[in-house]
Image (spheres, rainbow, N blue to C red):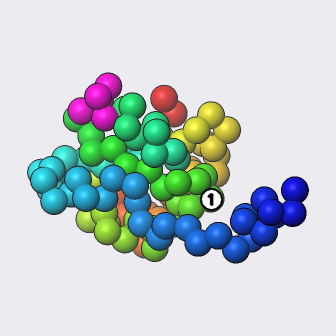
């Protein structure tokens, strides 16, 4: 419908990671795990507490600007089912920019 097209083209998106406030209380050496959807980050927090779980909000939102606040930390990406190749390619570029980032095949 027209309203959805307009929303997708003009809606403002959050420029930061979902879960970013956790960095105030979590140890600086605790690795960051990044998923696509906020609900996945919430569910994974209880399942794998060895990570600080965050979300980018969309497969295409993974970029250096959005990750700037976690640069310098160890980052593991957990892409959705069909996102591995895309996020693996993006991770290569992010490593060139100085990010310590890997992509899980889990």
Answer whether residue 102 is visible to the viewer in this image: no
Magenta segment: 45-49
Label 1 element class: helix
Estimate the x, y position of residue 84 in percent, counting from the top left: 60, 42
For the point 74% across and 71% down, the residue is 9
Estimate the x, y position of residue 101 in percent, counting from the top left: 39, 54
For the point 48% across and 29% down, the residue is 106
Estimate the x, y position of residue 98 in percent, counting from the top left: 37, 69
Magenta span has 46?
A: yes
Which SS type dominates the magenta stretch? Answer: helix
Q: In which quarter of the image is residue 13?
A: bottom right
Q: Is residue 44 left or right of residue 22?
A: right
Q: State the residue position of label 1.
A: 60
For the point 37% across and 38% down, the residue is 42
Q: Is residue 87 left or right of residue 73?
A: right
Magenta span has 42?
A: no
Answer whether residue 25 is visible to the viewer in this image: yes
């Amino acid at each position: 419908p027209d309203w959805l097209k307009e929303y997708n083209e003009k809606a403002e998106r959050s420029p930061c990671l979902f879960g970013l406030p956790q960095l105030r209380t979590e140890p600086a050496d605790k690795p960051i795990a990044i998923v696509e959807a906020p609900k996945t980050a919430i569910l994974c927090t209880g399942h794998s507490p060895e990570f600080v779980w965050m979300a980018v909000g969309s497969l295409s939102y993974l970029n250096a600007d959005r990750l700037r606040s976690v640069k310098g930390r160890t980052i593991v990406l957990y892409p959705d089912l069909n996102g591995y190749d895309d996020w693996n390619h993006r991770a290569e570029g992010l490593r060139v920019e100085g990010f310590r980032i890997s992509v899980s095949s889990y």
